[in-house]
Image (spheres, rainbow, N blue to C red):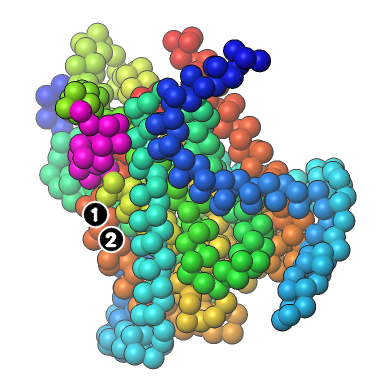
Amino acid sequence: MNTLGKRRSARASVALHTTLCLAVLCALFPIVFILLVSLRGERGWTDPLALEGFTASNYVHLLTRTEFLLWFANSTIVAGLTMVIGVTIAASAGYAASRMRFPGRGSLMWSFLVFQMFPVAVLIVPLYNILGTLGLLNSHGGLILTYCSVSVPFCAWMLKSYFDTIPVSLDEAGQVDGLTPFGTFWRLIVPLAKPGLAVTGFYTFLTAWSEVAFATQFMSSENRYTLAVGLQNFVGPHRAEWGLMTSASVLIMIPAGIVFFFAQKHLVAGLTAGGTKG
Amino acid sequence: MRTLFAGVRRSFSQHWYAWAMVLPVVVVLAVVIGYPLGRGIFLSFTNANEANLGRTVGDFHVPSTYEFVGLDNYWQVLSGQEGSFYPRLGWTVVWTASCVILHYSIALGLAMLLNREMRGRSLYRVLLILPWAVPAFVAAFSWRLMYNTDVGVLNSLIGLLGFGPVDWLGDPTLQKVAVIAVNTWLGVPFMMVALLGGLQSIQRELHEAAAMDGASPWDRFVHVTLPGLRPISSTVILLGTIWTFNMFPVIYLVIGHAGGTESEILVTYAYRLAFQGVRDYAGSATYGVIILSLLLVFASVYRQSLKRQEVRL
């Protein structure tokens, strides 16, 4: 740490940049590798070190002759609705937990935390049976309901810590002006909390978008698959379409990467907020 | 009795607003977690499987014929008769500990480097965060291709150095090393960003004062940096432990259909119990309840020990 205002020696500087470059190499290698393989045609993956034969044929094949776009749409719909439901119903609970002292508040906060520990193995069988009884297996609705078990506690936890960062004096001003508590929440705090809502929603979206365990069992017909299930079809026991797999991976990484780039700072602040306040 | 009622009424009139605002969440959680959890616990006391669970085939309803077996499932698993619990628990603990230790130490090292003033700092930061943006299932498949024995890029690189191909996903030990590497790659960026935030919140003056007093860089690291990072560290380690313990996609998709089940952690094993072969719903539920209990115990012990440390400080 250059805290003493001393200049770093040339040797230390080289060591610093070398270490960081090595770390960057490790971080980027798989991503770049996948990108290269995806651009080298159907058999490109069988010769991983060659840098020739670049073609977009994998992408053409993926977009025109597989159900990739349909899976993409399915994933987006399921994750989008999960996000909307999660954020909407969790916001008011998060606000109440942040501002009001009521009996049951402690156990509510505790349950938000504990529910995030639930392993998929506890809930999957009962949920599978329940959805089967309700006729919701193999439907987007059933999957969205399932994902609420993950998203609602998480959203409530995140939003509560975000509301904690908004000064209480604003609420008091609102109440002086004659707003009900819900009015204060809805008209004053929600507009101010837009960045927090956005980041929470985004993270919920990503979690639902890349969920594997539930989707693999609950969705049985190919036209309802989400991406995480559909991609497993490209490289099953009897198939090895790595060209399709890698090009699909690239198309999934690009939008995720862009949004992620903008959201990551707020995301960390939100996830660790509970901890910094003790 | 009368005072009790009055108390309830008073507290209701005082708190009905807050309760109304949390009601939707409580209802949803009761439906999607409370009821399934209760049913999961119930199933763990039975011998339910695919064959004896009630189901509707066409217009016919086949009634359930499974029986209540009390604590038998737990006894089978915990006494070791079922055979795979303790080895698997051991591997799950090793997996969780090595992943979290690697995440934390690599992330702390990188965060300390990034916390210096230098050229290209924000570029390094962005590039190092990229793996976090990759969905776990995409990363799992990508690494599976890289680990391929005959045409994987890792073996090709090793081949260039003159070594023979390594059977990454076939050999049980290497399989474990391989999945730990994937999860480390995926998990470092989150810890790094979190710890970097923590480092930046430590006041410069503390370091300067320590240096004035003649503290070596190592002393400053131990006595200024680490204590300053404590609140953030305790949260990310707790989160990281829970996430890794339950990490499903990496293990499930990287190992895939390749090898035996030795490198499966508790969660993926419970999942396979429920959905492969004769679906053993009761066994899977038993494992699920045990996993949840372990995590709950861990989280509360962890929090308690943190509190005790704070008191001592």
Q: Amino acid at mark 1?
A: Phe
The quarter of the picture where residue B174 lies is bottom right
Chain letter belonging to callout 1: A
Instruction: Identify the residue at horizontal 39%, vertical 44% (top origin).
Output: A90
Cβ–Cβ under 8 Å for marks 2 and 1:
yes
Nearest to the observer: residue A45 or residue B19: B19
In the image, which disc is placed on residue A257? 2
The segment highlighted magenta reads A178-196
Residue B150 drawn at (x, y percent): 52, 77
Q: Quadrant of residue A177?
A: top left
**In front of the other: A184 or A243:** A184
Residue A276 appears anywhere in the view: no
Marking on residue A261 = 1
Q: Residue at x 47, y 82 (%)?
A: A223
Choose between B10 and B25: the one closer to the eye: B10
- Residue B150 on the magenta segment: no
Q: Chain of mark 2?
A: A
Helix, strand or loop under label 2: helix
